[in-house]
Image: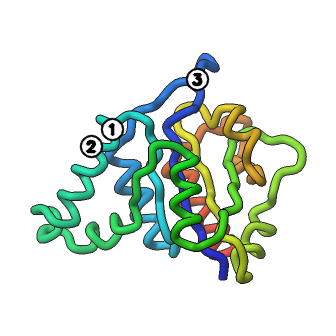
């Protein structure tokens, strides 16, 4: 089975006006996506931000649950957050996956926007079921990954479709749906 990794990019992403911004790291994203990663056998979940203060915040959150008072209060949270890693940017996450596995990962970006040549969940699930290169699934924050990120990925995953024309899931909700589709085939 190929290894699956996640990266949550906080830069470069769009704001609602289409400007490239850096979004804030949220405690809820770290906790919830960390729990998803552990539940769905993701080898590592990278929180990627170029902001040193936000990386220190994530380190502080992790320390609280791994070795601080939280480790005694809720041992299962400690286990879930063990998958969380920090990177300054996408390149840092890619390099870390390559260092750990010995192979350059295939980078698969996500987007709520449709378009041609999208990788289906079924096809990615098939790749994950076979031995091979690790897969790094890249999630965006804000209003989505910047074009400069999308231009350099190996694949763009098909969007999650709802029942109407509204399609703006939280990154936590989207990650849960994607991982269920990829690991359980739903």
**Element on which disc 1 rests:** helix
Question: Residue 136 sits in which quadrant?
Answer: bottom right
Q: Position of residue 20 (x, y in %)?
A: 58, 23
Q: Would you name the residue on which mark 3 appears?
A: 20
Quadrant of the frame with the C terminus: bottom right
Is 167 placed left or right of 66 in the picture?
right
In this rendering, does residue 128 appear at all?
yes
Q: Would you name the residue on which mark 2 appears?
A: 57
In the rendered image, the vertical position of residue 116 relative to residue 82, given as above or below: above
Tell me which residue sits at (19%, 69%) in the image: 74
Distance in Å between CA atoms under marks 3 and 2: 23 Å
In the rendered image, the vertical position of residue 19 relative to residue 51, given as above or below: above
Distance in Å between CA atoms under marks 1 and 2: 5 Å
Q: Would you name the residue on which mark 1 appears?
A: 54
Is 19 placed left or right of 73 in the picture?
right
- Asked if labels 2 and 1 touch by Cβ distance under 8 angstroms, the answer is yes
Check the image and tell me how it is coloured. Answer: rainbow
Toward the viewer: 115 or 104?
Answer: 104
Along the polypeptide, which appears first: circle 3 or circle 2? 3
- Asked if labels 2 and 3 touch by Cβ distance under 8 angstroms, the answer is no
Q: Position of residue 185 (x, y in %)?
A: 70, 73
**Element on which disc 2 rests:** helix
């Amino acid at each position: 089975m190929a290894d699956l990794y996640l990266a949550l990019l906080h830069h470069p992403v769009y704001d609602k006006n289409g400007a490239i911004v850096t979004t804030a790291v949220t405690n809820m994203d770290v906790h919830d996506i960390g729990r998803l990663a552990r539940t769905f056998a993701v080898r590592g979940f990278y929180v990627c931000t170029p902001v040193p203060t936000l990386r220190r915040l994530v380190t502080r959150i992790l320390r609280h649950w791994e070795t601080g008072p939280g480790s005694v209060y809720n041992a299962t949270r400690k286990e879930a957050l063990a998958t969380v890693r920090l990177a300054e940017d996408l390149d840092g996450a890619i390099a870390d996956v390559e260092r750990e596995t010995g192979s350059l990962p295939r980078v698969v970006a996500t987007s709520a926007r449709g378009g041609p040549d999208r990788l289906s969940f079924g096809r990615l699930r098939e790749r994950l079921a076979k031995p091979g290169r690790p897969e790094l699934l890249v999630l965006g924050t804000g209003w989505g990954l910047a074009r400069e990120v999308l231009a350099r990925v190996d694949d763009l995953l098909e969007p999650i479709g709802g029942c109407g024309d509204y399609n703006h899931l939280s990154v936590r909700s989207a990650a849960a749906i994607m991982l269920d589709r990829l690991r359980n085939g739903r």
